[in-house]
Image (tube, rainbow, N blue to C red):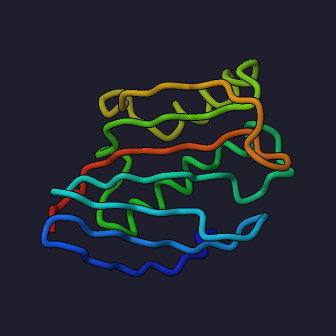
Amino acid sequence: MLAATISHATFDRSIVLIMIKRILPYEGLLHEVVEHGGVLYIGGIVPEDTSLDMSGQANVLGQLSRLLQALGSDLANVLQVTIFMTDLGEKAAFNAAWKAHFAEAHLPARAAVGVADLGPNVKLEMTAIAARSTPT
């Protein structure tokens, strides 16, 4: 379940910072979204339940979907995703979840990058760039 508080701060007329504080397995302000010209730059989505295997942790895609809906967009408007994984051998499990979330006609550009560590039991972290469905 998406447990988030969304607040907006405008520093000039073209850039809006959207700060989202979530209840996650460790402390901190972990998710920030910056909007510029109707494009949402989403950083650092990590699994809410790090006790799950890769298939379960791939629910970051569901988190992304809910976040986009709250911000006036959806998965069909995702332009690019970068996935950081601690074990690229688990990429097939992530790909199965990927295919379940993205329609073939709306596949974004994507890169998967192997990394040494993302935190205790965190198997992946994802950033995304998406267009707002209706620019503000």
Q: Nearer the viewer, residue 102 or 17?
A: 17
Give the residue drawn at x 15%, y 65%. Answer: 14
Counting from the top left corner in percent of width and height, residue 126 is at: 55, 43
Left or right of residue 123, residue 95 in this image: left
Question: In the rendering, at what x and y percent does residue 8 appear?
Answer: 34, 79
Task: Indicate the quadrant where residue 21 lies.
Answer: bottom right
The residue shown at (64%, 48%) is 59
- Classify residue 33 by image quadrant: bottom left
Residue 61 spot, x, y in % from top left: 55, 47
Q: Residue at x 45, y 72 (%)?
A: 19
Residue at the outermost top position: 89
Determine the residue located farthest toward the front in the rendered image: 11
**Which quadrant is home to the N terminus?**
bottom right
Q: Nearer the viewer, residue 18 or 4?
A: 18
Give the quarter of the figure containing the C terminus: bottom left
- Residue 75's place in the image compared with 105, above or below, is below
Is the residue 19 above or below the residue 98 in the image? Answer: below
Q: Residue at x 37, y 27 (%)?
A: 109
Tag count in the figure?
0
Compare residues 6 and 15 and report the one nearer the observer.
15
Relative placement, left or right, of 111 versus 30 is left
Compared with 89, 79 (above or below) is below
Asked where in the image residue 85 lies, by quadrant, the reply is top right
User: In the image, residue 24 lies at what x, y percent?
Assistant: 72, 67
